[in-house]
Image: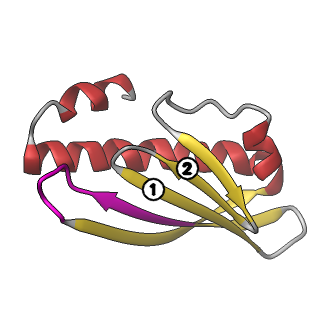
Amino acid sequence: MAESFRAGVELPDDCRIEIADDRLWVLFPESDFVIQTRPADGPDSVHLIFSVAVRAPEPSLETWWDKWSVPAERRVQAEVARDEILTSRKMILRMLDERFGAGRRSAEMRYA
């Protein structure tokens, strides 16, 4: 999957991708996603394991974490990961906007 991301999976401009060991990091200003793959039943399937840390805007020091997994076919795992990240980020931006306001809605609308 890391090779697919390097090859150009389209993500928003405000993210940075890092690859370390068996983890793919997709870093946004307000959240960090970590993706790992694990074997699933059958040679053509994997489990994508997502972890996310979400930071509240300053001056708050609130941080939230979550972890979940999604099954995927090996041949489309990068696209499944991308879609999962974008959908999750949209929910994160909405949650931050509802809780803290301050211009988060415009960022959310760019990725709707």
Res. 26 mark: 2
Res. 32 mark: 1
Does the magenta portion include 8? no
- Give the mark nearer the N terminus: 2 vs 1: 2
Give the SS element for disc 2. Answer: strand
Residue 35 falls in image quadrant: bottom right
First to last magenta residue range = 50-61
Q: Tell me the residue at 30%/50% (across/down).
A: 92
Q: Tell me the residue at 29%/25% (across/down).
A: 109
Callout 2–callout 1 Cβ contact below 8 Å: yes
Does the magenta portion include 56? yes
Give the SS element for disc 1. Answer: strand
Amino acid type at mark 2: Val
Residue 61: image location, x then y, percent: 18, 64
Mark 2 neighbour density, 10 Å: few (under 14) some (14–19) many (20 or more): many
Answer yes or no: is residue 1 visible.
Answer: no
Residue 62 falls in image quadrant: bottom left
Amino acid type at mark 1: Asp
* Quadrant of the drawing holding the C terminus: top left
